[in-house]
Image: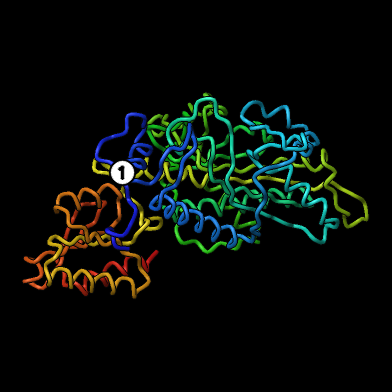
């Protein structure tokens, strides 16, 4: 993409309404624009990153054996009355009536709707196990929406639902989700710590939240510092293996890590003092096992091996896709702007032409652009007739991991400058070598 043809409405000044770094930088980098309180339009750069995050979530869900679908944003209130949650959810639920005076709601979650789909089409244990998921816009009418996409009213979320014959099978689905989430977050350049949490209005005795440590996190968290040494890496996990998934769960949840809602001071004090940590965290996902809570209330039963009708065991598993963008920025930025991890960057590399209109510089930039594109990479070429300082400031603000700077002086020596956004380190390379190095970096992901 050539920046002269792109829509990137960057702001030079910090917006007064932005209280945290991610909100401020997303507004300044032209990624979002507020439509109304807690509701945002996603401008091209923000939308591009959102799609990158969505694709990673899809890939890891499918890898784990889960099946994608799509449910509507509007739901009938009758289903929620059937489960008993219509009144329990409180004022966060946006309740509306259609033209026929029927009670409807803008879904904050989809347990009732997916259970209704299941009971209409599945009647035998032979069709189990089954996990369905979708990624969809949701709405919760927060009383004080704030912090940009971190606590908005409208948000983009992946929610998945497993249906199993027994509790043991459902707990394997729980463990399988935990494994897939660890892989998902690491691909995004995040370390998300699974922490024992409270079930809230969804319910369930087994639940873990995944939290990214950040000073602006809404939750106070207590943990053993040893959990931050754990990485998923490139493990080859068989998701059908109960033993392998259980082993990963035990490895990543055996150390103390809890939110303030489930914190146990006595257990925390058993940790060696030098490893006790109290910090803030941003929730980016949560997994639940809630047994037969919804299947019994809504008569979602199957015929078991003995011919008897039994309610299925269920769980739900969410990832806040739009919230993830804010979490990544909170965890990866400096005083100049965003620093995108390579796995989620909107463009793989920036190209800065220091002397737009110079025949040799223009030709070199065009050649770099073509070479990177031919290798399947997406460069962002700043071909505007702007001062060099302004071009560098824009690139630093939007946070592309790598920048190739092209100027007449370097070209006389046959080199361009390749710069790492994260470290600030630069090296001079022949143009072909710079392209090759960028390509090798992304090939390793």
Q: Is residue 66 above or below residue 157?
A: below
Q: Residues within 10 Å of mark 1 (few under 14, many from 20)?
A: many
Does residue 86 appear in this view? yes
The C terminus sits in image quarter: bottom left
Does residue 276 appear in this view? no
Which color scheme is applied?
rainbow
- The residue closer to the viewer here, 389 or 396, is 389
Q: Is residue 385 above or below residue 101?
A: below
The image quadrant of residue 316 is top right
Badge 1 marks a residue whose secondary structure is: strand
Going by the image, does 119 lie left or right of 223?
A: right
Q: Give the residue drawn at x 27%, y 47%.
A: 397
Direction right: furthest residue: 307
Residue 157 in the image: state x and y as whole percent: 56, 46
Residue 285 in the image: state x and y as whole percent: 54, 43
- The residue closer to the viewer here, 231 or 144, is 144
Residue 203 in the image: state x and y as whole percent: 69, 34
Going by the image, does 15 lie left or right of 84?
A: left
- The residue closer to the viewer here, 134 or 17, is 17
Q: Give the residue drawn at x 42%, y 33%.
A: 147
Residue of label 1: 333
Q: Give the residue drawn at x 34%, y 53%.
A: 7
Going by the image, does 336 lie left or right of 94?
A: left
Direction front: furthest residue: 99
The N terminus sits in image quarter: bottom left
Q: Is residue 336 above or below residue 215?
A: below
Going by the image, does 400 lie left or right of 123?
A: left
The image quadrant of residue 73 is top right
Number of numbered discs present? 1
Q: Give the residue drawn at x 54%, y 39%.
A: 154
Residue 58 in the image: state x and y as whole percent: 55, 58
- The residue closer to the viewer here, 189 or 265, is 189
């Amino acid at each position: 993409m050539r920046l002269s043809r792109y829509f990137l409405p960057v702001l030079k000044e910090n917006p007064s309404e932005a209280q945290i770094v991610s909100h401020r930088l997303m507004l300044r980098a032209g990624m979002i624009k507020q439509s109304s309180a807690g509701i945002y339009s996603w401008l091209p750069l923000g939308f591009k990153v959102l799609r990158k995050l969505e694709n990673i979530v899809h890939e890891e869900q499918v890898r784990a054996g889960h099946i994608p679908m799509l449910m509507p944003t509007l739901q009938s209130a009758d289903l929620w009355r059937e489960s008993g949650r219509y009144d329990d959810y409180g004022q966060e639920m946006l309740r509306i009536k259609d033209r026929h005076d029927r009670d409807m709601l803008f879904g904050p979650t989809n347990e009732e709707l997916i259970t209704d789909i299941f009971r209409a089409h599945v009647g035998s244990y032979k069709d189990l196990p089954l996990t369905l998921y979708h990624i969809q816009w949701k709405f919760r009418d927060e009383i004080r929406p704030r912090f940009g996409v971190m606590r908005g009213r409208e948000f983009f979320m992946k929610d998945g639902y497993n249906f199993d014959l027994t509790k043991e099978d459902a707990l394997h689905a729980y463990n399988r989700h935990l494994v897939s989430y660890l892989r998902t977050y690491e691909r995004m350049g995040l370390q998300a710590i699974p922490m024992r949490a409270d079930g809230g209005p969804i319910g369930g005795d087994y639940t873990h939240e995944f939290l990214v440590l950040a000073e602006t996190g809404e939750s106070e968290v207590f943990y053993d510092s040893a959990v931050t040494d754990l990485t998923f890496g490139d493990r080859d996990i068989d998701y059908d293996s109960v033993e392998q998934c259980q082993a990963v769960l035990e490895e990543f949840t055996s150390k103390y890590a809890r939110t303030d809602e489930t914190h146990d001071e006595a257990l925390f004090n058993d940790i060696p003092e030098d490893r006790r940590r109290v910090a803030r965290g941003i929730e980016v996902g949560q997994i639940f096992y809630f047994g037969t809570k919804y299947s019994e209330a809504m008569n979602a039963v199957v015929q078991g091996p003995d011919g008897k009708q039994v309610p299925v065991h269920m769980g739900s598993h969410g990832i806040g896709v739009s919230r993830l963008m804010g979490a990544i920025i909170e965890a990866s930025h400096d005083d100049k702007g965003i620093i995108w991890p390579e796995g989620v960057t909107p463009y793989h590399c920036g190209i800065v032409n220091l002397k737009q209109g110079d025949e040799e510089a223009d030709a070199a930039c065009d050649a770099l652009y073509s070479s990177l594109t031919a290798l399947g990479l997406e460069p962002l070429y700043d071909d505007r007739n702007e001062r060099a300082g302004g071009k560098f400031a824009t690139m630093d603000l939007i946070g592309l991991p790598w920048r190739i700077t092209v100027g007449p002086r370097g070209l006389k020596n046959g080199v361009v400058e390749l710069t790492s956004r994260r470290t600030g380190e630069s090296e001079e390379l022949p143009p072909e070598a710079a392209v090759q190095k960028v390509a090798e970096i992304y090939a390793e992901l």
